Amino acid sequence: MALNPSKFNSFTFFKLPSAWWCGVRLKFIDDQKAVTSVKHKWFNQNPFNSMFWAVQGMAAELSTGAMVISQIQKSGKKISMLVANNNATFTKKATGRITFTCEDGHLIGEAIQKTIETGEGQTFWMKSVGVNEDGVQVSVFNFEWTVKLKKS
């Protein structure tokens, strides 16, 4: 079953409800790139009238993790995935609609193939850049993903 934004957004309602209720949505996905967005609202704001950093983190992580899920699914193998590390930089107040783009899908396939071949866990870093409606960067998130073949 191919992953598409509509199916994935339904998945978030049941499996990632806090992201769904905050308005995080997957807008585009292929093997190389994923795009998510979230709109600043009363529900996801901080006391400074901008988007709470954790809401940005959910949207950024989803732009990386959706591709990991998709490529694991395509491998046909039982593989676990987990964020081992992350960091973020905030450069501007996040108001309006924030769009996060990750273009690091090319890193996933090699890690999945290595874990299948060796049985050893693999790690890789993926970056997601958040921009506002004017195209101005508001934050950058980096996630260190681990993938490991599940024991039968």
Image (cartoon, rainbow, N blue to C red):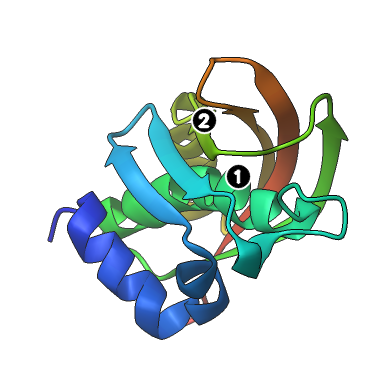
33 or 51, which lies in front?
Answer: 51
Badge 1 amino acid = Ala
Mark 2 in CB contact with mark 1 (< 8 angstroms): yes
Of the 4 image quadrants, the one containing the N terminus is: bottom left
Position of 48 compared to 33: left or right? right
Task: From the top left corner, tell me how far across and down residue 73 is, in percent.
Answer: 30, 59
Q: Position of residue 69 (x, y in %)?
A: 40, 57
Vertical placement of 126 versus 11: above or below? above
Please give the name of the residue rendered at 33% of the width and 52% of the height, measured from the top-left corner.
70
What's the amino acid at mark 2?
Answer: Cys
Query: Which callout, 2 or 1, points at the residue further toward the start of the chain?
Result: 1
Task: Judge left or right: residue 101 versus residue 75.
Answer: right
Which residue position holds label 2? 102
Identify the residue at horizontal 74%, vertical 31% (top origin): 139
| SS state under label 2 | strand
Question: Which of 19 and 31 lies nearest the eye of the viewer?
Answer: 19
Residue at image location 87% in from the left, 60% down from the top = 47
Q: Residue at x 62, y 69 (%)?
A: 43
Residue 89 seen: yes
- Above-or-below relation of 152 to 133: below
Mark 2 and mark 1: span between their CA atoms? 8 Å
Q: Secondary structure at mark 1?
A: helix
Position of the C terminus, as image quadrant, is: bottom left
Across and down, in percent, residue 36 comes to: 44, 43
Mark 1 neighbour class, 10 Å CA radius: few under 14, some 14 to 19, many 20 or more:
many
Q: To which residue does mark 1 refer?
A: 60
Query: Crowdedness of circle 2 by 10 Å Cα count: few (<14), some, many (20+)?
Result: many
